[in-house]
Image (tube, grey):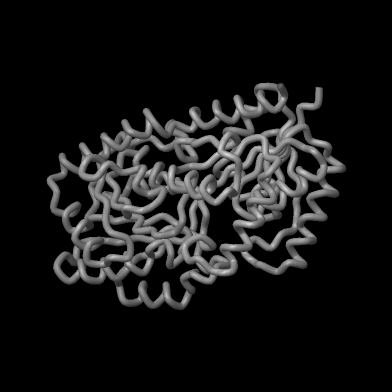
Amino acid sequence: MNKKIIIFANTSWFLFNFNLNLMLHLQKLGYEVVALAPEDDYSTRFAEYGISFNAITMDNKGTNPIKDGLLFVRLVLLLLKQKPACLLSYTPKSNIYASLAARLLHIPIINNISGLGTAFIREDWLTKIVKWLYRLSLKKSSKVFLLNEDDLTIFINNNLVQAEKTELLPGPGVDVQQFSPSDKPNHNKNFIFLLVARMLKDKGIGEFVEATHLLKVQYPHIECQLLGFLDAKSPSAISSAEMQEWVDEGIVNYLGVSDSVVDYLRLADCVVLPSYYREGMPRCLLEAASVGKPIITTDWIGCREVVDDGVNGYLCEPRNINDLKDKMEQMLLLPEWERFQMGYNGREKVLKQFDEQIIIDRYVKAIEQVYG
């Protein structure tokens, strides 16, 4: 029996950081796992786990039809050579073109729609094209996983996928062993608000900076930190110059990128994500809750699922700087034991609803259905 499974996404970083445990679990079950993504600093790291890696060239954010056509051809040729029994795909462009190639070659594919991204924030010509591509590509998918009810409703109501092929996952899941609370109490000199995300305007970075600016007038002892990729290839990316200006003004500290996000989460007093991006479900919020940190995020698609308002954090209005500032002030003024209780409530919520093992088990079930 052919037990080769290819797992495809738009970066090796994404596969290594977010799908390694799924890959290792599939290996234990006797599957041959192949990682497929563009080459980056993480591409060589699969080898130490006995996972094969195949590099593929793709323009992650571009809309050039010639480049996308070449991606489709590369995928067809690679699949003909590899002859997998099943294909798992993540991220928008990977989902679309892998599904088209798999459909042509009659290879079962399981898609993960982990958020709709920039194309669905504003309805324009790009949205229409993306919808058409989803409708065409997902027609023969074996299973389409979505991460929140809003996205599921959009996909079904717009006939982008047949309802019977869809399944709702409780988010992307989080490794609750790795992202566990610290056994040492924080003794921060300053109260730390931490935002972890790609540095995109749609993630609410600008609103966070403005709210921080207002808050620091009254509470100069607060420290607001940003952690994540800068200068992403996106029209809404924060530039290095903008970031440096904020740092020079003393509004925020930019921490760069880290492989040890859990260390920064444990040191924070509160994690903030004022996103109005079309999130599937932000992994950073799940990780923050898993380490026992209270959260402030927007009452927005994908974000609101992680926070029970007033129980493990606060919800604020999207794009509302004053409301965000008020919620940050509210969190700052809470007695320490109340913030601790919020963090504890968040950890319990993750253990019950968002443990990564729940997602892995659902994938194994979907793969077993492919094999019949």
Q: Is residue 333 left or right of residue 142?
A: left
* Percent coordinates x, y for residue 2 in the rendering: 80, 26
Q: Residue at x 82, y 47 (%)?
A: 78
Relative depth, front residue between 88 and 348: 88
* Corner quadrant of residue 29: top right
* Percent coordinates x, y for residue 349 in the rendering: 33, 33
Rendered view: 174 above or below 283: above
Residue 2 in sight = yes
Rendered view: 315 above or below 236: above
Q: Residue at x 40, y 42 (%)?
A: 286
* Corner quadrant of residue 320: bottom left
* Percent coordinates x, y for residue 240 in the rendering: 48, 73
* Percent coordinates x, y for residue 23 in the rendering: 63, 33
Relative depth, front residue between 221 and 357: 357
Relative depth, front residue between 22 and 222: 22
Q: Residue at x 42, y 61 (%)?
A: 203
| Quadrant of the frame with the N terminus | top right
Rendered view: 33 above or below 156: above
Q: Is residue 117 left or right of residue 262?
A: right
